[in-house]
Amino acid sequence: MLVSLILAACSPDTGSLTSAETEWIQNIAVTTSDDIPMVLEVTFDTPQAATAWVEFGDGSPDESVTASKDATSHEFAVIGGQPLSDVYMRVIVEFDGEQYESGIFTHTTGQQLPEMPTFEVMVNNYDPPESAVLLMSVYNNPSALVMLDFDGQVVWSRGTIDNSDGLGVGVLPMNGEIYYNTFSDNRWRNAQLTRMSLSGEVLQTIDTPDAHHFFTPGPDNEIAWIQYDAETPDTQSPVYGDRIVIGVDNPQPLISTWDHLTFEANAENLPEWTHANWVEYNPERDSYLMSTAFTDVIIEADTDGNPLRIMGGVNAAAGDSDYSFESQESQFSFPHGPHWTSKGDLLVFSTRNGISSAVRYEVDDDTSTLREQWRFGEDLRLNALALGEVQELPDDNILINWGSVGIIQVVEPSTDTVLWEARSGLQEFPAQVHYMDSPYATR
């Protein structure tokens, strides 16, 4: 019976979908997304509000599963993964403790878009979950959003903006949607935050005046973002520091560099003073991390904007750091992409004397000391002229995004073994990277 159903499902007429329907699953329809041809849009109805999801795969529907939704009219984006391939699908509905499933049906994905970024996997000794992907923003012309699997296949991609008009670097998976930001490189004008469905449909565009670089969901998923903060200290024209603001409907300032760092005029950097380049909220610590590249400072602030820790590197102004380094040779510089580890250590992407590296520090609050625990990459002699980040994966390995160098690595830190490495073209380098156990993972 199952075999005959699959054969019927492969038929090009709509009877294949009708034959898959049941009393609980009606009006099944499948279309190929116009915006992302490798995504299939599956819709169906249930007679009562019920939780439903779609199982799917390229050989059978038992390989992957979407997130679930509770509704009577259901719509799911199925990420088929490969162009012009048949995807087998099955709908599952759960109501009052019982599960109901449709028959199996298929649909073919579309041709990949020509501007889709490409990556080459150079090392592949890593074994994450089969459905794991890296969601990233890719700086190119146009910039793009990408899901890359660990075989090096781009399974989902959407162009965002022409770089002659603006930049796009931040990306975030949240509530089953993709958020990304764009802004002009002329004092960060025309900044916007955009919500997009997994089908590539733009759901909302929000103005975020003077925003730049990255953003983060805070408590209750309220968006926090970096905004230029201009003042005129002992200069004839405005000087641009930075602040974190909370919210997109009625943005409220959280913390400003003017209140906590020492302004030192530097003709090389003015009118931009601090160049904040990263903000991230850590729910376990209930705090934000912000890094400022031109002033070599990382600030941890609580949700009321009070600085909990100010940690200054090589070029920090005198008195602008609550912490010293156990060794001066271990100081970070031009910090980017800092993250806390599960053990409370600080990971920093640092570029010092033209050499970039990933560094892990123990933060000793009793002695106000940053103690280097691990450093990786100095022997590679790579110089990330822009961006870069380092973060701990759920399995304790370390993910390093080498920014403008165009390399992403997964490193086993106890042996410094590179388990996985992918390279992109230098004109389409990763800006921000999120590891996801599944394309449907959400915050």
Image (spheres, rainbow, N blue to C red):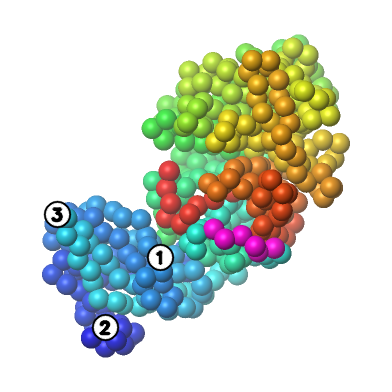
196 with respect to 412 (left or right): left
In the rendered image, is residue 127 in sight? yes
For the residue labelled by badge 3, is the local secondary structure a helix, a strand or a loop?
loop
For the residue labelled by badge 1, is the local secondary structure a helix, a strand or a loop?
strand
In the picture of the structure, the residue carrying the numbered disc 3 is: 96
**Outermost residue to the front:** 414
**What residue span does the magenta drawing correspond to?**
123-128
**Of residues 121 and 117, the one drawn nearer to the viewer in this rendering:** 121
63 with respect to 101 (left or right): right
In the picture of the structure, the residue carrying the numbered disc 1 is: 64
At label 2, counting other C-alpha atoms closer than 10 Å, the crowd grade (few under 14, some 14-19, many 20 or more) is few
**Of residues 256 and 54, the one drawn nearer to the viewer in this rendering:** 54
Q: Is residue 402 above or below residue 87?
A: above
Closer to the chain start, of discs 3 and 1, is: 1
Task: Tell me the quarter of the image containing the N terminus.
Answer: bottom left
Residue 151 location in percent, x, y?
59, 66
Q: Any magenta on residue 80? A: no
Label 3, label 1: how far apart the Cα atoms are:
24 Å
Q: Which mark is residue 212?
A: none
Closer to the chain start, of discs 2 and 3, is: 2
**Of residues 41 and 402, the one drawn nearer to the viewer in this rendering:** 402
At label 1, counting other C-alpha atoms closer than 10 Å, the crowd grade (few under 14, some 14-19, many 20 or more) is many
Label 2, label 3: how far apart the Cα atoms are:
26 Å
In the picture of the structure, the residue carrying the numbered disc 2 is: 2
